[in-house]
Image (cartoon, grey):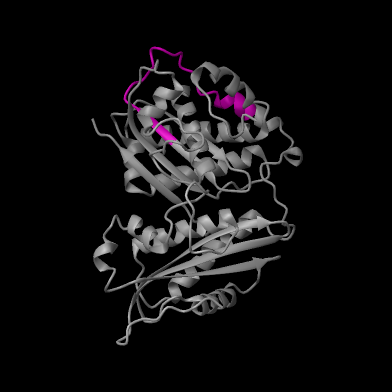
């Protein structure tokens, strides 16, 4: 069964046009563009397909279906663009960053509606993944909607948001980042209707009809310059490689170091530079050093364990022009590479791997990060110098 590496977060409150943000005054032109621009048509169709899926799911659970609200859709779309352009999955936007529309979901809704909206948000789901498989608008949008739905459904917090009976409307949006991941946000509201704005109906039927007319041979959703490697092959390879590496480890995997490893793998894939240091305001930034990244991922808990088990971070780069037949052999070579680059000597207490990839001309670059908590030998640990 095919798997993909995914990341998601949730927040719940109980009881050409491309990368550009908009407000509701421009809503009509934004939606019109979704019928003529292939990328935006795919994003919009995926959103409306997801709307169909979530309402079917709520019906099965005997919960009132959700109304579609384009003001919430536009708010979600703006947030996707902020996450994609800043390389950060978060419910909170940082001021002084590109495409900033507000710190929290409520602030972003107020920005989108120019403080004229009448809805109040009840929850927000956000994610990114690399699942945009297909050769046509119809196939790609179907893949995006189905993957997002399953991804959120399989996570208790996100599933709770999707089934929340106190939510009566929502707006889901997707953002296809060129040569990058798919970002998605679903913003829920307590209200069925926003009295200050006409509620745009989910025009799924008409958009599906338009998509069916599109000639898949003339549609370019992604720039795929690697001739011998398909995106889906790269996704499968990354997932398999990650699984093989984790299974080969004799120590447990810590959640915090896994998050730190994957975050840094994404950062170096964005920067296309092997480094242990991250720079602020760069795509994918999570923390300047490996210690700061694991502190952030562990909500500061690692601070109490630092003297006993310091952190070692190793990085490997795999450059491929075609998918190898033997993934096990490739994984072994990567582990050897990581051991040679290992920063600290000692006994691993826990370890985790992060994998990300980037296409560069006709080569697929796979970036692998291993983060370990290491128990020093009796003599203490020694830092290895770079070769």
Look at the image and tell me whether residue 69 can be seen.
no
Q: Is residue 232 visible?
A: yes
Residue 168, position in %: x, y? Answer: 34, 25
Q: Is residue 353 above or below residue 152?
A: below
Residue 191 painted magenta: yes
Q: Position of residue 61 (x, y in %)?
A: 33, 37
What is the tally of numbered marks visible in this picture? 0
The segment highlighted magenta reads: 186-209
Residue nearest the observer in this picture, 47 or 333: 333
| Residue 248 located left or right of residue 46 | left
Image point (55%, 50%), residue name: 130
Q: Quadrant of residue 247?
A: bottom left
- What is the quadrant of residue 294 in the picture? bottom left
Q: Hey, which residue is sitting farthest front in the picture?
A: 385
x and y percentages locating residue 262 in the rendered image: 46, 59
* Residue occupying the point 41% across, 60% down: 260
Q: Quadrant of residue 138?
A: top right
Where 21 falls versus 242 (above or below)?
above
Name the residue nearer the viewer: 260 or 12: 260
Q: Is residue 169 magenta?
A: no
């Amino acid at each position: 069964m095919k798997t993909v590496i995914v990341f998601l977060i949730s927040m719940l409150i109980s009881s050409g046009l491309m990368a550009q943000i908009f407000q509701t005054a421009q809503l009509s032109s934004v939606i019109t563009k979704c019928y003529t621009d292939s990328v935006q048509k795919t994003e919009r169709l995926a959103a409306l397909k997801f709307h169909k899926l979530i309402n079917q799911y709520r019906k099965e659970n005997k919960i009132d279906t959700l109304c579609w609200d384009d003001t919430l859709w536009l708010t979600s779309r703006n947030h996707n663009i902020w996450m994609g352009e800043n390389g950060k999955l978060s419910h909170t936007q940082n001021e002084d960053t590109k495409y900033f529309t507000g710190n929290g979901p409520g602030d972003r809704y107020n920005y989108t509606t120019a403080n004229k909206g009448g809805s109040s948000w009840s929850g927000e789901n956000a994610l990114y993944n690399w699942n945009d498989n297909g050769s046509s608008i119809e196939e790609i949008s179907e893949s995006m909607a189905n993957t997002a739905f399953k991804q959120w459904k399989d996570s208790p917090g996100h599933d709770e948001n999707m089934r929340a009976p106190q939510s009566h409307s929502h707006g889901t949006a997707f953002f296809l980042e060129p040569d990058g991941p798919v970002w998605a946000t679903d913003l829920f509201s307590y209200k069925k209707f926003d009295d200050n704005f006409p509620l745009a109906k989910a025009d799924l039927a008409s958009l599906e009809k338009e998509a069916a007319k599109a000639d898949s041979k003339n549609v370019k959703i992604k720039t795929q310059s690697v001739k011998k490697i398909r995106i889906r092959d790269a996704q499968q390879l990354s997932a398999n490689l990650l699984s093989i590496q984790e299974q080969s480890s004799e120590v447990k995997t810590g959640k915090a170091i896994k998050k730190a490893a994957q975050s840094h793998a994404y950062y170096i894939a964005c920067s296309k530079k092997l480094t242990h240091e991250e720079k602020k305001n760069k795509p994918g930034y999570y923390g300047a050093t490996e210690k700061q990244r694991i502190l952030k991922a562990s909500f500061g808990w690692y601070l109490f364990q630092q003297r006993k088990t310091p952190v070692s971070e190793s990085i490997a780069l795999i450059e491929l022009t075609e998918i190898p037949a033997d993934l096990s052999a490739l994984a072994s070579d990567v582990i050897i590479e990581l051991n040679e680059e290992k920063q600290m000597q000692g006994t691993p207490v826990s370890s985790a791997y992060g994998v990300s990839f980037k296409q560069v001309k006709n080569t697929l670059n796979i970036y692998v990060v291993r983060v370990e908590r290491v128990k020093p030998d009796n003599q203490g640990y020694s830092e290895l110098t770079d070769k």
